[in-house]
Image (cartoon, grey):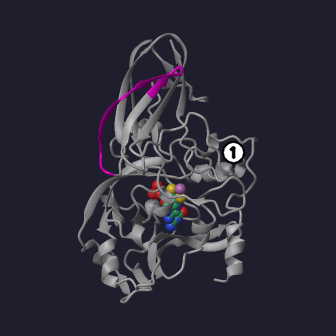
């Protein structure tokens, strides 16, 4: 790829319009109808049922036949490999709970609002993924000494920012060799549902979801940095439309609570009976273990009780008793991880609306 081409891409706007204070657009509604979030009451489950796990599909779901599908591993390797689903399933299998979150989770709460998939707070889920570790496969293929990255390409394609491409993302050789990085073919004990990447997807635990390429068809070792749209333009922390910005990788610390009581249908405002109320939620981070969760009741923060994490890359449950008194109340929660990162209570804005882990706010009427 020419230098000129690379420069053009680095300044190509990944968002379809300027951030806005205006009402939700028809295009955002179309995207949110296709890409659903996890209802927050599903935070009660350790493992999110597949049908309640959030979904993010940039283009169309590709139809892939498991019989003819092959994974090609090539490029700067000593020995190219072509594997069927049976070949991959015959390799050593690992099952691991992993919390996946979309980097755009919380986007629609930002002011002004970056115009893209307008997530509120539910772009998260935890599944039990089964697959085979990637590193031994890369070792079998033998990466050339000048290989710098692995490019993972899906079977789906479309146009974004004026660029037509298959969905593709890369990892450095060091990142791809991490032992937890897997090629997965089952979710919660069943074959991968078509919408989650059937027959095979990459899973990069600890990273925001964009790295976990679905409908995986090829892995290519390359000798210079991959400049595809989803890698070089999308998924950057930026203050304006022009790059380069900081590439997005690991999940920022976040906690969420199950909204207590019952909702009002249209506003979803909560109605709770006075007396002791058990508040429950989950917290996770891709930067270390969650070590503290606090619940804010009308601005006063108190520590929550933490359960052990489900796994090294999965959320942990928290709970706290709140003695609810009649009137209007504002509940919040925030988590801190072992890297020292704490969820902010005010927004930290960026142009693509990425990584907004601002503390959740739940308005409650106690009767
Ligand atoms: N091939 C392909 N892989 C993809 C995507 C996509 O659109 N196409 N979306 C990515 C994004 S942005 C996220 S957040 C996760 C969502 O995974 P899920 O739908 O299984 O929850 O898949 C990632 N992998
Ligand atoms: Mo995402």
- Along the viewing direction, whichever of 5 and 119 lies nearer the viewer: 5
- Badge 1 crowding class, 10 Å Cα cut-off, few under 14, some 14 to 19, many 20 or more, is many
Q: Is the magenta stretch mostly helix, strand or loop?
A: strand
Residue visible at 68% across and 68% down in the picture? 10
Identify the residue under disc 1: 113
Residue visible at 46% across and 66% down in the picture? 214
Position of 130 with respect to 229 (left or right) is left
Position of 161 with respect to 340 (left or right) is right
| Placement of 126 over or under 325, stated as above or below | below
Residue visible at 53% across and 34% down in the picture? 360
Q: Which residue lies furthest to the front in this view?
A: 340
- Along the viewing direction, whichever of 285 and 95 lies nearer the viewer: 285
| Placement of 301 over or under 342, stated as above or below | above
Instruction: Find residue 237 and report its horizontal and vertical position in percent.
Output: 61, 55
Instruction: Find residue 21 and report its horizontal and vertical position in percent.
Output: 75, 41
Stretch in magenta: 295-312
**SS for callout 1:** loop
């Amino acid at each position: 790829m020419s230098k000129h081409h690379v420069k053009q891409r680095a300044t190509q706007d990944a968002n379809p319009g300027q951030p806005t204070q205006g009402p939700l657009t028809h295009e955002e509604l179309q995207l949110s109808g296709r890409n659903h979030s996890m209802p927050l009451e599903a935070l009660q489950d350790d493992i999110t049922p597949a049908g309640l796990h959030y979904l993010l599909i940039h283009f169309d779901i590709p139809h892939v036949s498991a019989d003819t599908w092959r994974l090609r591993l090539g490029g700067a390797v000593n020995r190219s490999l072509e594997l069927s689903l049976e070949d991959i399933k015959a390799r050593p299998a690992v099952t691991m709970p992993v919390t996946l979150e979309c980097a755009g989770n919380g986007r629609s709460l930002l002011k002004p609002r970056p115009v893209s998939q307008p997530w509120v707070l539910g772009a998260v889920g935890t599944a039990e993924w089964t697959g085979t570790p990637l590193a031994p496969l890369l070792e079998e293929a033998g990466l050339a000494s000048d290989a710098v990255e692995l490019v993972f390409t899906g079977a789906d394609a479309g146009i974004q920012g004026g660029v037509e491409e298959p969905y593709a993302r890369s990892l450095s050789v060091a990142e791809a060799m991490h032992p937890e990085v897997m090629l997965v073919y089952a979710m919660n004990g069943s074959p991968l549902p078509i919408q989650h990447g059937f027959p095979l997807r990459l899973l990069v635990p600890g990273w925001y979801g964009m790295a976990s390429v679905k409908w995986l068809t090829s892995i290519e070792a390359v000798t210079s940095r991959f400049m595809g749209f989803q890698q070089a333009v999308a998924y950057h922390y930026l203050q304006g439309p022009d790059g380069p910005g900081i590439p997005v990788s690991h999940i920022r610390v976040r906690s969420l609570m199950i909204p207590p009581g019952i909702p009002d249908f249209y506003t979803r405002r909560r109605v709770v009976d006075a007396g002791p109320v058990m508040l429950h939620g989950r917290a996770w981070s891709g930067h270390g273990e969650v070590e503290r969760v606090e619940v804010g009741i009308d601005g006063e923060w108190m520590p929550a009780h933490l359960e052990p994490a489900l796994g090294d890359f999965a959320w942990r449950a928290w709970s706290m008793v709140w003695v609810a008194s009649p009137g209007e109340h504002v509940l919040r929660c925030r988590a801190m991880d072992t890297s020292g990162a704490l969820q902010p209570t005010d927004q930290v804005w960026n142009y693509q609306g990425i990584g907004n882990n601002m503390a959740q706010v739940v308005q409650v009427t106690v009767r």
